[in-house]
Image (cartoon, rainbow, N blue to C red):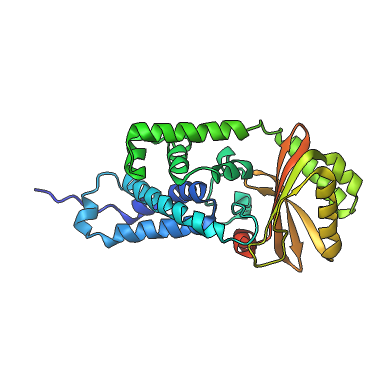
Amino acid sequence: MTTPSEPELSTIMSERRQLINLAYRLLGSLADAEDAVQETYARWYAMPPAARAGIGSPGAWLTRVAGRICLDLLGSARARRERYVGEWIPEPLPDPADDPADRVTLDESVSMAFLVVLESMTPAERVAFILHDVFRYPFAEVAEIVGRTPAACRQLASSARRRIGAAHVPAAPPPRQAGLVRDFKKAWEAKDVQALVVLLDPDVTAVADGGGLVPARLDPVHGDDLVARYMVSIASRTAGLTLLERSVNGRPGLAAEHEGAIVLVMAFDVEDDRIKRIWAVRNPEKLRPWTLS
């Protein structure tokens, strides 16, 4: 009887990018996603070689384990975020061309607006929805990860889908988004409150995330005039700030550089040719990919 050979290292490691893509969408944090994938591989190599050789689909095994790890992390993350200083914003990602690791494929499912809606879901809803609707795993496989029946997972994904649908507004064409962000940059650099107001939706919301590590407003700012004045106050308080047009999670955004380091990344949501939402990430732990690139 022939003993099955252990999967090649290259075969196992070729799954890494897929696992990072999955874990980032589930966790909203590249650092946490990398930790989850590292733990997944640790569990793989903790098994005896004969056990590894007996697994017919290493990719499916790795996905199942990574999904369970992320599900557990999402449960504990809720408790951590209740203690988080200020607002928690998902970790922004630079354009793959700026990221030498080229780790996360940027599409609609990693836009900042999409990730923020995912944060409103229960861990089980989020895992069922991402695995089924984004990565196209059948509910029978999703059920093994979530620990519920396929019918229950179908209901979880349906509930998550309704949340997405209720919050979703068709995105403006990329050139229009880029133009609005460029005009926002110019008005911000000029400290022109009225020029900013023209670009903002009357009900615009701006949210900042400093994580308690750097100064940042703890509560969201609402309304075009208040947001415009808030942005001008930031520019007035920080001398030597250089604004750069950058792709943020696949959408036009801005990065602010101070003394050679990226200190702020801003993502935007555009509705009806106006900026509806602004997410400003200042937490240096979430800017690590930008520092590396």
How far across and down, in percent of the image, does residue 253 sit? 71, 48
Left or right, 76 with reference to 269:
left
Left or right, 91 with reference to 57:
right
Outermost residue on the left side: it is 1
**Residue found 55% across the figure and 35% down from its top:** 163
**Position above or below: 234 against 213:** above
How far across and down, in percent of the image, does residue 218 sit? 69, 58
**Residue found 91% across the figure and 45% down from its top:** 194
**Residue found 62% across the figure and 47% down from its top:** 249
The front one of 270 and 182 is 270
How far across and down, in percent of the image, does residue 291 sit? 64, 63
The front one of 49 and 66 is 66
Number of numbered discs: 0
**Residue found 22% across the figure and 60% down from its top:** 48
How far across and down, in percent of the image, does residue 226 sit? 83, 49
Find residue 167 and report its image quarter: top right
**Can residue 12 be seen in the rendering of this structure?**
yes
**Can residue 138 be seen in the rendering of this structure?**
no
Location of the C terminus (image quadrant): bottom right
